[in-house]
Image (tube, helix red, strand yellow):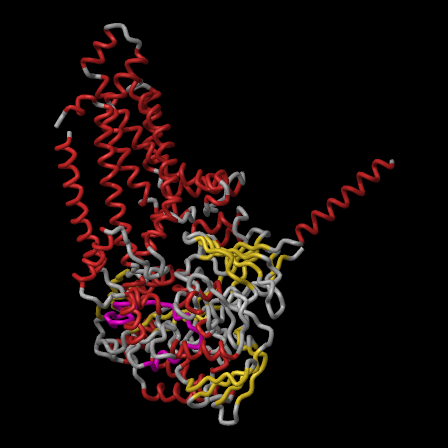
Amino acid sequence: MKLWKTTLAAATLSLAAATSAFAARTDLTLGIVLEPPHLDPTAGAAAAIGEITYANVFEGLTRIDDNGQVQPGLAESWTVSDDGKVYTFKLHSGVKFHDGSAFSADDVKFSLDRARAKDSLNPQKPLFAHITDVTAVDPATAKVTLDGPQGNFLYDMGQVAAVIVGKGSADGNKDKPIGTGPFKLDHWAKASEITLVKNPDYWGTPAALDKATFRIVPDAAAAVPALLSGDIQAFANMPAQDALGQVQSDPRFSVVIGATEGETILSINNKKPPFDKLAVRQALASAIDRSAIIAAASNGLGKPIGSHFSPGDAGYIDLTGVYPHDIAKAKAYLKEAGLENGFSATIKLPPVPYARDGGQVIQSQLKEIGVDLQIIPVEWAEWLSQVFTNKDYDLTIVSHVEPNDIDIYSRPGYYFQYDNPKFNGLIKQLGTTVDKDKRLELLDEAQKILAHDVPAVYLFELPKIGVWDAKLQGMWTNWPIEADDLTKVKWSE
Amino acid sequence: MTAYLLKRLIIAALTLVLASMVVFAVMEILPGDPARLMLGLNASADQVEVLRNQMGLNAPLLLRYLHWVAGLLSLDFGRSYTYSVPVIELVRERIAVSLPLALIALALSTIIAIPVGVFSASRQGRAGDTLAMGAAQLGVAVPNFWFALMLIYLFAVWLRLVPAGGFPGWGAGIWTALKSLILPAIALALPQAAILGRVARSALIEVLNEDYIRTARAKGLPYRAVLWRHALRNAMIPVLTILGLQFAFLLAGTIIIENVFYLPGLGRLIFQAITQRDLIVVESIVMLLVAAVILINLLVDFSYAIVDPRLRGRQ
């Protein structure tokens, strides 16, 4: 009897040890599709750079949270002058970079001056265009002066390309990123994986994970077996849409569909005949059936949009009804443009499933109104040079993933070739408007202009398809910015 | 022999020069700007120009070609635009995966193909032969992408014997590293073995019909000895030719298998470099591969001489 008891006690003990061993799991392997070319978010536009480093390795003055809201980052608080031109940031004290050097207002000045310098290669340089001066008042206070009030300034300072880098380490960040975040780079096995480890000297709430590995899984078909075998425990955005059912029915995994800032649109070359005629663009918008496109191009998961605005953002209005799917109406528009017999055009499709699959549906939908589309598949490099830079295209499909980017329609020389003075004026006013209600009003109007004027046909918002182990908590549902913020991620018992 | 060798070397050098011109020209003709790719949609044209100057892309074409060739001659393969590390370093990392993988796959395919070829040839037209060649036909027909996925589901997801993909690096221990190369090697080897087996069979059948084989049998040598010692050796030349071609393919042409198993191999590096317009990486690696293929072909030529003594004396 005594022996039995001892055995039982031992068994209970080892069971307890086993559970606590499970509870103590502190490592995570995430899958990502594209490898970042380097790890410096201030020097490259590749989304994978921010996905890995944002909030984990690098931090900005402010930070963007899961809901797209601005939160304090390296600046614990700030004040704005009455004229809206001067921002005084009070910085956290005791912050250290991963190389041991202390963070101070000098680094803020260095980072912002570097980003706005004449020879700056910052991929989001326009974010810093309105800064006229940065001063380190004292080690814990930085003062930023703007050329006028900026409605989005605090948000912009939380974006990926606005992170604060160290004065002494900035040049080496491509290979050895030195930030202030709760994780630091452990090693990068090229084309294989990037491993972050917990930063023991972190100034804020320490991360729950000790180690996070981003493993590069370039093939969509390989993503599912990687999850099923347990090699990879999370995809912030799963590439294999077709195979989603396989994990959706499996209780070991959570499938979380969230929103991104990716407006997927049928871009139109607005200066190229016949697309310079409003009626032709209206015909395109009326001929298109969004639900069929969404079914083919995003497995039915994308949300339909009627203007260039994310349904997840404050101020969104549903404008999908402005040009409802109506073939007869579309034909009437064509007749109005003097093209009742239709016309032929080309559509250049970049190598992403949403474009290639969506393009075929659009081709068949436009055939119904006599518009004969020739599909030209292009690589990204070709797309950038032919479509984006040289504007040598009729139509294309692309997802504009930058947050709050409705202003692109007012940029001179942008590839839409859309020029509407009324819209440009609105965007200019929006840029300098700080008042929240007034901003919403202006955004409302801007969305409506685009919806009615059809500089592009608005298709759907790209979904974020999160798939991870059901025991994993704290992963981002939405992608207000493309970041895999792991600061609150942990394993449940 | 020396004259023969010299002639071969001159041809090899000319091939390299020609290849360098073609590779360079093709990469230049491809539309796409590496600087714009790196900076993305929000960068201004001025910024792109600054980066192009930094990368040296604004220099005249001929100058860039000569600069590149001069670098190659002094074994300097340039720096990657995207990774900003020396190309040779990238190659060294990737070859540590691709070369062992190619060798294992080649060994596997030879071990499978030769016995199957001998078996089939010696039972020409009988049930065993039909069955083996049917299997070989299947091996060629099955897409290795699909076959690889089936292997993953069976051995990684269901039996959990090996990882589903990835490569931990040789630093993680030889066995751990080898374990992640087993499935890709099998997936690569099987279709190669199927081709090799068919070549071995037909070469062997041809040799078995030669007069000297009948003579050897007539003088009382056992069939097995004739088959393995006399016939197989003479059937080796086409087999070696195919092996040489297969090795060149396995070194860098395995991009699909590398993707399915997410291995950091040479094929993926080239593919990625092309999509990123990392011109210098593509150009330099393609040149290295051309050199490797020429070298392999030379080795194959020499091995002909080993299996066929008559070739040794030939000029």
Q: Which residue is pictured at 84% across the width and 40% down the height?
A: A5
The image quadrant of residue A326 is bottom left
Give whichever of A212, B53 is nearer the camera.
B53
Residue A278, how many percent across, how many down? 28, 80
| Residue A368 visible somewhere in the drawing | no
Residue A406 in magenta stretch: yes
Q: Quadrant of the N terminus of chain B?
A: top left
Q: Specify whether B235 is left or right of A314.
A: left
Q: Which residue ends up furthest to the right in the rendered image?
A: A1
Q: Is residue A96 left or right of residue B38?
A: right
Give the answer, above or below, for where A285 lies relative to A222: below
For residue A199, say whether it is visible. Answer: yes
Where is residue A13? Give x, y as percent.
76, 45
**Quadrant of residue B214 within the rendered picture:** top left
Determine whether A120 is above or below B182 in the image: below
Where residue A206 appears, x then y in whole percent? 62, 65
Q: Percent from the top left, x then y, of residue B229?
A: 29, 16
Q: Which residues are magenta?
A: A385-411
Between A113 and A161, which is closer to the camera in this rendering?
A: A113
Viewer-closest of A266 and B16 = B16
Quarter of the figure that contains the C terminus of chain B:
top left
| Residue B115 is inside the magenta segment | no
Total labels drawn: 0
